[in-house]
Image (cartoon, rainbow, N blue to C red):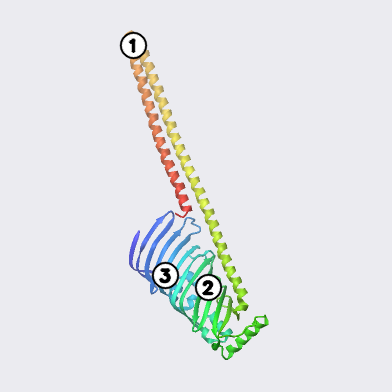
Amino acid sequence: MSASIAKLVYDNMDMSNVEGTMRVKDKQLILEYVRMNTLDGTLGVSGIYSTTDAAKPVVDFMLDIKDVDVKQAFQTFNTMEKLAPIAGLASGKISTKVNLKTDLDGNMMPVFSSVNGGGNLMSTSLTFSNVNSFNKIADALKMDKFKQWVIEKVNLSFEMVDGKVFVKPFETALGKTKANISGWNSFDETMEYVMNLSIPRSEFGGAANNVLNNLVSEANKKGANFTAGEMIPVAVLIGGTISNPKISTSLKSIASNAMDQMKQQINETIQQKKEEVVTKVREEAGKYVEEANARAQKLLADAQKQADDIMRVANESAAKIRTESNTRADQLIAEGKKNGTIAEIAAKKAAEKTRKEGIEKADKLVAEAQKQSDNLMAKARQESDKIIQDARDKAEGK
């Protein structure tokens, strides 16, 4: 079904110029790039809402969001708010392409521990103000500029694994300070992020200079033999939760082991999930084909039983016809004998004709039944082959 709607209001979401195609097949609602204007931008949705398992519905969507207001988007989509709460505190416009697969609970809400997928997020500019994590970084470094962070030319990629969002390393800047950021956060607000900062030496003044001296002292105690140049490499480790972040800082060289371990953990988690998904897909595919084979065999067995019943009834009827024609033929001969030789000869000819007609009628009945049975089995085999082929195609993602 194709539709075009000028204006549509759903829950707290105003939409206009809604266009797209929807299909219902095999207990699935299939959206074929449904497009709309909303949230001061555009939204495209493709994917499947499946109730194949009625107790555990699943959505598997691809979202193509362009130039929407970030605050409106996060207020509208609870999934975004849960999985990327810090981004919801920003102001600006974002574009994102996201593949999202999740189970749904009884209230048709995502089961966040089952959320998997990935995508990217882009923005020409995002402004963060009064964010706990950034405020604590500012306090730790004694640099108030981190309390309001304007991130220019954002272009980051992420993967979602069982409700965790893994942000791949991306570059940004705050004034003359360059930053490389990566890490993860979960729907339960826990997080681990690393920010590799490159801060101009000239910006370390007053209390910030004391912070720098302490960082250098700590590094040299561990044998770093660090000398401050024009750009100071500072690593910021962010842990704890979104609402109660824990911040630690050190010179980048000292924090490298922790950062490497985090990157390794992220890569291992993503790889493990990919392997689990592949295994699960194979298992589900095998199960689906196995179930299809069972349905196909049952279809053939039911058809064979019906065909056997048709032939049994036909053979019983044919036998009855033959018996009746033989009985009638014998009666004709007996009656002819009572009326003399000529009558007997005539009766024998009539009896022979009666027997022949009975045999022909019986044979015709059996032949028609055989044809009906053969057609029935041929159709069943065709349907059986289609069931198995459709299952194999679905298992292979066709």
The amino acid on which the numbered mark 1 sits, given as a three-letter code, is Ile
The residue tagged with tag 1: helix, strand or loop? helix
Residue nearest the observer in this picture, 196 or 335: 196
| Residue at mark 3 | 65
The amino acid on which the numbered mark 3 sits, given as a three-letter code, is Ile
Q: Residues within 10 Å of mark 3 (few under 14, many from 20)?
A: many
- Gap between marks 1 and 2 measured at Cα: 109 Å
Q: Nearer the viewer, mark 3 or mark 1?
A: 3
Report the disc number at residue 169.
2
Residue 60 x, y percent position in the rendering: 46, 61
| Residue at mark 1 | 345
State whether residue 248 appears in this view.
Answer: no
The amino acid on which the numbered mark 2 sits, given as a three-letter code, is Pro
Residue drawn at x 62%, y 87% is 213
Query: In the rendered image, which quarter contains the N terminus?
Result: bottom left
Residue 374 x, y percent position in the rendering: 41, 35
Determine whether, in the image, residue 34 is placed left or right of residue 164.
left
Residue drawn at x 33%, y 66% is 5
Q: Is residue 321 above or below residue 257?
A: above
- Gap between marks 3 and 1 measured at Cα: 98 Å
Residue nearest the observer in this picture, 58 or 391: 391
The residue tagged with tag 2: helix, strand or loop? strand
Quadrant of res 274: bottom right
Quadrant of res 143: bottom right
Residue nearest the observer in this picture, 372 or 120: 120
